[in-house]
Amino acid sequence: MAQQDYYAVLGVERGAAPEDIRRAYRRKAKEHHPDVNADDPDANVRIKQINEAYEILKDPQKRAAYDRYGHAGVRGTGGGAPPGSVDIGDLGDLFEQVFGFGTRGRGAPRPRSGPTPERGADMRARVTLDLEEAAFGVTSSVDVVRRETCDDCEGVGAAEGSKPVPCSQCDGTGQVRKVQQSVIGSFVNVHTCPHCQGQGFAIENPCPSCMGRGRTQRPRTLEVDVPAGVERGIQIRLTGEGEHGRYGGPPGDLFIAIDVKPHPRFRRDGNDLHVEVRLNPADAALGAQIPVPSLDGEQSVRVPSGTQSGDALRVPGLGVPRLRGIGRGDLVVTTVVATPEKLTREQRELMEKLRDTLPSAEVIEQDRGSFWNRVRERFT
């Protein structure tokens, strides 16, 4: 863009007062703003010149340097306003005059000083444990592949010696504005810039390591402390161990789902453990002290005389530790009276003698007095 005299751009004299410069800027911005001149391809060029001139002349120090040295006196001072921008102090009045409504209190879209930080995505993984590990806790390893900040460009996405530049489509604002006419007036539609996805910056020279993305895929092995008492379906969150954020944003979290393999002996029900034990008819009838497996090793459990198949013996405190609680569940021992299939001659003789002393088989009568039997009889 060719440099022009800033006073001529605003149409004021060199000795103009600050208020005259302000009024001239508002008049010029209103007349040449791209939203008003959507069909004029030179509108962007003119508004750039107007903004640049106002940024210099409204500042006493920059104006003094310009008056003394010309454009060379303000080069590199950041006086040139980004394309398409309007001074925030004037934007509300300007849009109220042009479109019939203002933007006071909401602020105007301004070119961004840098990409907006974005939080990293959460991740999920799964850990499969043995029953003993789930019951008493364990430190387990989990393998993940996550996106981490690129070491070469430090997450910027630009190659060494370069940096992101303002997006040419939205002039660094991250928004694309379009004026539409209707029967009730003019409206400005604001959309996220499709070129920079709303960031306001573009990568002209991308980093070769991450191809401009600012992050790279990396495999990691993480250690997770599984507390005692977890069960299938429980999730453990590792804060900050998800994907790294973009442009300095915070990382996401890693959620680890717990799975527990079936056990050949035990069945878990909440914090209780169930185990089945076969008894011979003599131990069931006479009672006995029998060995029973548990997560703490073999235990000796007293079986009372007259025990039947399906009877449950509860041993307190030998179940699973309570998650986020105190104490443990119980070990529930279910008895199964096993009838011998093969007997020695001596065992048969003993069983025959025993049979002669026991009652013969008898039919078990239904309890006619029960509620459900009365209902059944009524309908049959």
Image (spheres, rainbow, N blue to C red):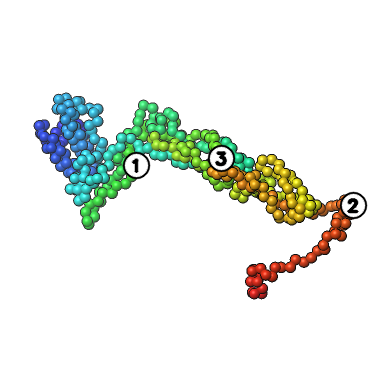
Please name the residue that numbered disc 2 is placed on.
Answer: 345
Please name the residue that numbered disc 1 is placed on.
Answer: 198
Task: Residue type at mark 3: give it.
Answer: Pro
Please name the residue that numbered disc 3 is placed on.
Answer: 227
Dot 3 alpha-carbon crowd within 10 angstroms: few under 14, some 14 to 19, many 20 or more = some
Q: Secondary structure at mark 3?
A: loop
Q: Provide residue 69's location: percent of width, then percent of height.
A: 16, 25
Image label count: 3
Residue under the image location 11 percent in, 34 percent down? 17
Residue 228 shows in this picture: yes
Q: Provide residue 200's location: percent of width, then percent of height.
A: 32, 38
Q: Is residue 224 left or right of residue 32?
A: right
- Real-space Cα separation, disc 3 to disc 1, in angstroms: 43 Å
Viewer-proximal residue among 152 and 242: 242
Task: Residue type at mark 1: give it.
Answer: Gly
Q: Provide residue 325's location: percent of width, then percent of height.
A: 55, 44
In the depicted structure, whether residue 148 falls above or below residue 184 = above
Quadrant location of residue 57?
top left
- Real-space Cα separation, disc 2 to disc 3, in angstroms: 56 Å
Viewer-proximal residue among 6 and 223: 223
Of the image marks 3 and 1, the number of the one nearer the N terminus: 1
Q: Is residue 143 left or right of residue 19?
A: right
Dot 2 alpha-carbon crowd within 10 angstroms: few under 14, some 14 to 19, many 20 or more = few
- The quadrant of the image that shows the N terminus is top left
